[in-house]
Amino acid sequence: MDKLIVQGTGRLSGEVSVSGSKNASLPILAAPLLTDEPCELRGVPAVRDVATMLRILRHLGVRVAAEGNRIRMQPGGYAGVEAPYRLVSTMRASFCVLGPLLARKKRASVSLPGGCVIGPRPVDLHLKGLTALGAKLKVEQGNVIGTARRLRGTSIYLGGAFGSSVLGTANVLMAAVLTPGETVIESAACEPELADLGDVLVQMGAKIDGHGTPVIRIRGVRRLGGFRHQVIPDRIEAGTFLVAGAILGGELTVRGARAEHLGAVLDKLRQAGVGLTIREGAIRVRRTGRLKPVDVTTLPYPGFPTDLQAQMTALMAQTPGISVITEKIYPERFMHVAELARMGARIKREGTSAIVLGVEKLSGAPVMASDLRASAALVLAALSAKGRSEIARVYHLDRGYDRIDEKFKRLGARITRVKER
């Protein structure tokens, strides 16, 4: 198991390129289960979650060839319709194979992904949508077992207690494209990653209107073809580097960052006193003066993303004044607070909010990553802290960031990956 040794850095400077989106790649990688024709996805990040999804595809009989950031897939030789716990348990997005298997093979057995350190993440909206299409589903011994002999288009409302579900919308969308009749998904997720999946399905021959909006209309087709697609840049990685530039000062250009995907994030950074220059295909971040505290509330897209909440908390922890971070998507997503406190942060939990009293400087300390985005927040805090920090369990970081420690090193960070004893 690896850990990171980080020595506090004065400033970051230079250019960094954002990798392809993990959250867009994962559901798109399930789309080949809908066809017999070759598929190719380019720009795929080299992260653990992608490797897990490829293992699931191979288990289901898809021939997979990975060449750098290009994945070639040849479906058709299905070995079965079961996605077992030993694979699904390590990554929630793998549950997205359920919709394609039901639509194409008319049956499936997919393990429930289970709980998560950031709080419960139920699949009830997935099951609600697929049941509305006509699938017969039951849960036995931790597996969702389903048959879908007579699917029919219908109107489905996918809103939940904490808003729409990106993966739930993706699962239902992929099932609906091969379902006879018209399906209307109301309160659909609007995230760019979902819109990217819709673009792929349209290229495959699906009849879809409104993907990327709250109402998606799908007219089922008999068959789909293959695709060749370049995945969108990772807006969460881009946001992570923008927050890093805000914390550490200097001048940092984030290539591949799309301003149209980061509106809420850019707004909060500007409120905090961060200078931003938006150019085609890049955003430059520059901090010259003192930061100002801002309040942040996470919301479904186009609101502030929950996947950048921990990083923003790390920024506000070093911003003089009081700020309030409210989590509306995953109310328990504050595991990073205790670790930031070890570095001198002054943060108090109040229900679904964290009240942050900013300090001038954090101090290096040994800390432990609890989840993917908390890992990124600890790296940002360690880079700006006084002294040396050790970040344990960085396998969480590797689930969603493509060699982020190497990227930081090229920007002037003093960061080393070592094996834990």
Image: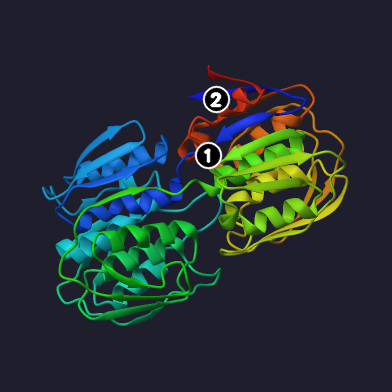
> Residue 18 has which mark?
1
| Badge 1 element | loop
Say which of 358 and 260 sits in front: 260
Residue at 46% over, 46% down: 21
Image coords of residue 368 (percent x, y): 62, 33
- Quarter of the image for residue 62 reads top left
Please, what is the three-letter code of the amino acid marked with disc 1? Val
Q: Residues within 10 Å of mark 1 (few under 14, many from 20)?
A: many
Dividing the picture into quarters, in which one does residue 146 lie? bottom left
In this rendering, does residue 60 appear at all? yes
Q: Which mark is residue 406?
A: 2
Q: Which mark is residue 409?
A: none
Instruction: Inspect the image, locate mark 2, and give the three-letter code of the amino acid beneath it.
Output: Glu
Q: Which is nearer the eye, 383 or 284?
A: 284
Q: Earlier in the sequence, mark 1 or mark 2?
A: 1
Left/right of residue 13 with respect to residue 22 in the rendered view: right
